[in-house]
Amino acid sequence: MTNAPPSSIKLPAVVGLALAVGGLIVLSWWMGQQAYHWLPVQASTAAPLVDGLFSFETALGTFVFGGVSAVMLWVIVMHRADKYDESDAVPIEGNTKLEVIWTVIPLVVVMGIAVYAMRVGETLGSVGPMEHIHLAQPAEDQGGYPGDRLPAEQIEVVARQWSWEFRYPGAKVSSTELHLAVDQPVTFRLVSEDVIHGFYIPAFRLKQDVIPGRAINFNLTPTREGRYRLRDSQFSGTWFAANQADVVVESLDTYQQWLKQSASQPLQAGISDAVQQYEDRKKLKSPGWATVVPAPPPQVNVPGSNTLPHDA
Amino acid sequence: MTSASFPPNYGHPEEGSWRRYFTFNTDAKVIGIQYIVLAFFYFMIGGLLAMIIRGELITPEADLVDRTVYNGIYTMHGTIMLFLFIFPVLNGLNNLLIPTMIGAPDMAFPRLNAVAFWLVPIFGTLLIASFFVPGGPAYSGWWSYPPVSIQNPLGHFVNGQGLWLTAVALSGVSSIMGAVNFVTTILRMRAPGMGFFRMPIFCWTALAAQSLQLIGLPALTGGAVMLLMDLTFGTSFYEPEGGGDPVLYQHFFWFYSHPAVYVIILPVFGIFSELFPVYSRKPLFGYVYVAVASFLIVGLGLVVWVHHIFPSGVAQWMRNFFMFSTMLIAVPTGVKVFAWLGTIWRGKLRLTTPMLFCLGGLFNFVFAGVTGIMLATVPVDIHVSNTYFVVGHFHYVIYGAAVMGIFAAIYHWFPKFTGRMPYEGLGKVHFLLTFVGANLNFLPMHPLGLMGMPRRVSSYDPEFAFWNVLASLGAFLLGVSIIPFLLNMLSSWVRGDKASANPWNAIGLEWLLPSPPAEDNFGENVPTVIARPYGYGTGLPLVENQTAYEQALQEA
Amino acid sequence: MTLSNPPNQEHGHQSHNLTGFIIFLCSESVIFLAFFSGYALLKTSALNWLPVGVEGLEVHAPLINTIVLVSSSGTIYLAERFKAKENMALFRGFWLLSMAMGAYFLYGQYVEWSGLKFGFTSGTFGGTFYLLTGFHGLHVATGIGLMGLMLVKSFIPGNYVGGEQGVEATSLFWHFVDVIWIILFLLIYVWQ
């Protein structure tokens, strides 16, 4: 039996492979850059960190997916059986070295990504204590809203079916439009009066479920002036999709002006699209299936708007 | 020399008429077909619901159906697709393949098998009936998170959510019956010579998946029972007013429902592992590693559930722990993916319909794996969780990989169990429409999620319109793609070419049986296994006296 | 040269029943584990665990019940030993005794329930208490039923020709029910 010559890989194959891998690396890097465009504008301190992690994952993912797809394409084109060839291929049953390589390398890579992500999470430091509380009692029974007992900088967010109320205890202002001062850290206290809601502002890259029976502290720092969307992200019933509010990030001066002016506004019905849609629906002959009745719109100093154009 | 003698009706089509498929029949091969056909019936219903969803979402406003109707429809779409399509169809494949692949005459408990099947149309009817009770069906998504799921606006004792919970509980009973059966069969009824490391990978992954069912389902049942108590009897396990905790439900729910996704994908991994060798004429690369990886996935799959609820009421340390555990699953999964690449590399590929579905499925799966890694990292997940990014991810896995794998299996084993050949041309058309439709439907969901479009919405801000239109077009294409499949199945079964015992020239015990096999498969003549599976190119026989079996099959 | 069949295929499916039953029991234990962990989580995170007017649970009578139930595991084991020695009279005697002890346990549970000052809907404490004890009681009742069935079948001639998997499975189930109770007792009555 003759020995096969030591398996030397041909030069064109090495060059071709190097070019392909090189090309894939370039493509991956490029996709990583593109990834930033798929995301909304960066409007909080969290956004660049989250986007950076996502961009890195996109680049890595492009490399892996691209590599696997390239191999599959190569095989489909180059390793097809001839038309009438019914015979078997070379019976290669495995390769332990290869198994070790493609176990260890992915292990190291995914653990590396996890560590990177953990550091990002720590830097964000967005979620705070999540104490259990008694569900909100009528204000009269408690001698005032819970928000009255919060530190001045905190904003209490009350989620309902289907509206968002924002209370500024320090300034004694309430609104259904969230105003924030740019570059000022803010702590929210998230409470729900009925079911689970999701406090989600895509431009900030932050989201926290609002759980009835708990008061959850949530921190962020907006970094870009503009008008952004706050969307309910945890299914909360019939008008879940319409439970959206606007977030206005403005300069500190403008913000403080707004607070001062709002404090003197009389209470009026805030925004709750569900209320009007519920009324319209009642007029229909066959409106649909059963629904929970929307909570009355919160009484606030400033309703604001949720129909103006928003940046993200 | 004694030649293998086969049972009397060997070589002729099964004597039984089509009527036996509508009876309480204990033959696993009949039950398998019953499961699969019933599952596709529900697939059509779930698919119709999907068409309505995408019809609503092709425009920003909620203008097609009332919001309550939309919410009921998306809830039932998910519920039907999971509990009435994918789990039953996989149990159907288990019934057909496990006994024949291991040389057993039937399942360990044939009557239990039939009972488990007949529970499916029972709870299926309950679920469909919920559309017609006052108040409509369950409407809070297939998760049924309290408190919203148990608000029960009309206050009736019998309501959509209650029917949903009852149906899901019955589904759990049916699945556990099946799991006890499949596990006992695989552990105790293998042919002589078939040690664990001579067992086909499909049986390994079935064993792994069914173990997950046994461990995980009772947790869901417990959580669901408590939810039903809250809904119907006014207890407060999850109601904050009574001291309960809604997040507790989430933990119960996901403790099962995460492993459930491995229950779905592991058999598909098994299908890929069976088919790539056949259509590349090469052994499965690293058989032992692929087998063991199935159980690494089982172990890890039980400790990752919190990644579904990162933004919920869970503390930061918990988010970190589960991020690390989730990341680890990529490793055994990667081992399998690389094994399949190693199998097809330098193979002699035949791009038949089953192979095309496997290749397409693998392609989609790797893409889904990449987005899965993204979702595993907490900071990114906080942004995209509960958005269309997740919907895109899981539909890539479920439709793009699992359903395509199931189609591959059906085309591949159709000749064996019906005795007819499916039409190859229609099969390729089905593949093309499915592959294009799935990618067109689910790829646009990723930018939508990144831009901040929440999931489960009946209306959305206008900036999301472009990608939604593309997604809806893809969905309609998927709807059309079912037509060549149904045509193929029906007409092939009735008037397709007669199939030989081994039309694909594959290696495996099931291919040493006639097409279709006799009721008791090998009967008295169970072969003794003498080699590992997938010995393509080695020229070695799989069983003792293999030529005797092949000769007998030829002579029939 | 004939092709041989593996032995288990000649005995049909009879020999697999115990395997299947053990697998089922392992799965069933998870539902109890789920309820146990739910109880523990709700108890540790509750603001007010016990309902108004309830100071705690009385331990004395449940302790007696526990002793009776755990002892019945002993008596059922003895019954099996007598059966192995083919002493059918003592087998049936101790079997019946185990059933009686189980029935006493259920009676004791009923007495305790009727004396309690809180109901199923009295907050999470009431809900979890009745859910756990009720679900367990259901299993005790099932066990007694299975034992009754086995007792009746023991009079059928030739009943044990194919093996005694029914008796084995039933006694396994009974031990299972006992272990669950011990954990339950520690969780609900001891840890107060």
Image: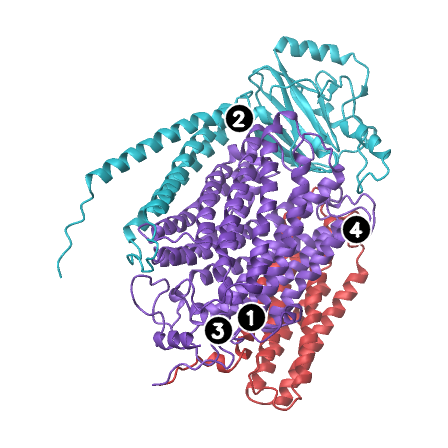
Chain colours: A cyan, B purple, C red
On whether disc 4 and disc 2 are found on a single subunit, the reply is no
Residue for badge 1: C20
The residue marked by circle 1 belongs to what chain? C
Report the front residue among A142 and C146. Answer: C146
Residue at point 48% right, 36% down? B374
Indicate the amino acid at tag 2.
Answer: Leu
Q: CA distance from mark 4 to mark 2?
A: 42 Å
Q: CA distance from mark 2 to mark 3?
A: 55 Å
Q: Would residue B279 appear left or right of B186 to someone viewing this image?
A: left
Q: Secondary structure at mark 3?
A: loop
Of pointers 4 and 3, the one earlier in the residue sequence = 3
Measured as percent of width and height from the top left, residue A139 is found at 80, 28
Indicate the amino acid at tag 3.
Answer: Ala
Residue for badge 3: B104
Indicate the amino acid at tag 4.
Answer: Phe
Residue for badge 2: A39
Q: Secondary structure at mark 1?
A: helix
Q: Is residue B397 visible?
A: yes
Residue for badge 4: B132
On whether disc 4 and disc 1 are found on a single subunit, the reply is no
Q: Is residue B145 visible?
A: no
The residue marked by circle 4 belongs to what chain? B
Measured as percent of width and height from the top left, residue C86 is found at 57, 89
State how many labels appear: 4
Q: CA distance from mark 4 to mark 3?
A: 44 Å
On whether disc 2 and disc 1 are found on a single subunit, the reply is no
Q: CA distance from mark 1 to mark 3?
A: 16 Å
The residue marked by circle 2 belongs to what chain? A
Looking at the rendering, which quadrant does residue A67 occupy?
Answer: top left
**Where A201 falls versus C173 (above or below)?**
above
